[in-house]
Image (cartoon, helix red, strand yellow):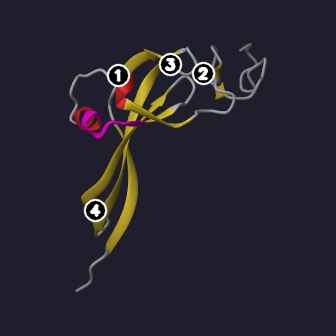
Amino acid sequence: MFFIIGLTTGRKDLKFNQMVICSRCGRYGRYMVYMTYTALSLFFIPCFKWNKQYFVQTSCCGMMYRLDPEVGKRVARGEELEIRQEDLEPVSGGWPGGQMKRCPNCGYTTDEDFTFCPKCGGRF
């Protein structure tokens, strides 16, 4: 009899949508919440998950926060709630330069200092 056992790390994006004015860059954006975990797999099927951590990333500048575990569990259960600033602990400073540019024509995003979009040629 053979057993195939393994340890893996994973990421699960959680369904959560909250529009905010970013405290770092001052732009309008939203919080994207995800969970990271370590899992024991038996025959490539995750059986047991541990080391769960919850993170929030802003869509405007990419600032990364660690989310309070209790609030993260509530988000994972699908509860309606609002993430407050005191629930967040800064982890990283976001994208270089602090701001991503998004083309209004095609939606292309970049952190480079372009005047025109390299994908469609439209003005940023």
Q: Which badge, 4 or 2, comes first in the chain's sequence? A: 4
- Name the residue type under label 3: Cys
- CA distance for labels 3 and 1: 12 Å
Please give the residue where the numbered disc 2 appears in the rendered image: 107
Q: Residue at x 29, y 65 (%)?
A: 40
- CA distance for labels 2 and 3: 20 Å
Q: Under tag 2, what secondary structure?
A: loop
- Name the residue type under label 4: Ile
Q: Position of residue 79 (x, y in %)?
A: 21, 27
Looking at the image, is mark 4 or mark 3 nearer the viewer?
Answer: 3
Q: Position of residue 56 (x, y in %)?
A: 42, 33
Is residue 46 placed above or below 79 in the rendered structure? below
Please give the residue where the numbered disc 1 appears in the rendered image: 84
Of residues 87 and 11, the one drawn nearer to the viewer in this rendering? 87
**Residues shaded magenta:** 66-71
Looking at the image, is mark 1 or mark 2 nearer the viewer?
Answer: 1
Of residues 103 and 32, the one drawn nearer to the viewer in this rendering? 32
Q: How many marks?
A: 4
Is residue 43 placed above or below 28 in the rendered structure? below
Please give the residue where the numbered disc 4 appears in the rendered image: 45
Q: Residue at x 26, y 37 (%)?
A: 76
Local crowd size for mark 2, using a 10 Å CA cut-off: few (<14), some (14–19), many (≥20): few
Local crowd size for mark 1, using a 10 Å CA cut-off: few (<14), some (14–19), many (≥20): few
Quadrant containing the N terminus is bottom left
Please give the residue where the numbered disc 3 appears in the rendered image: 22
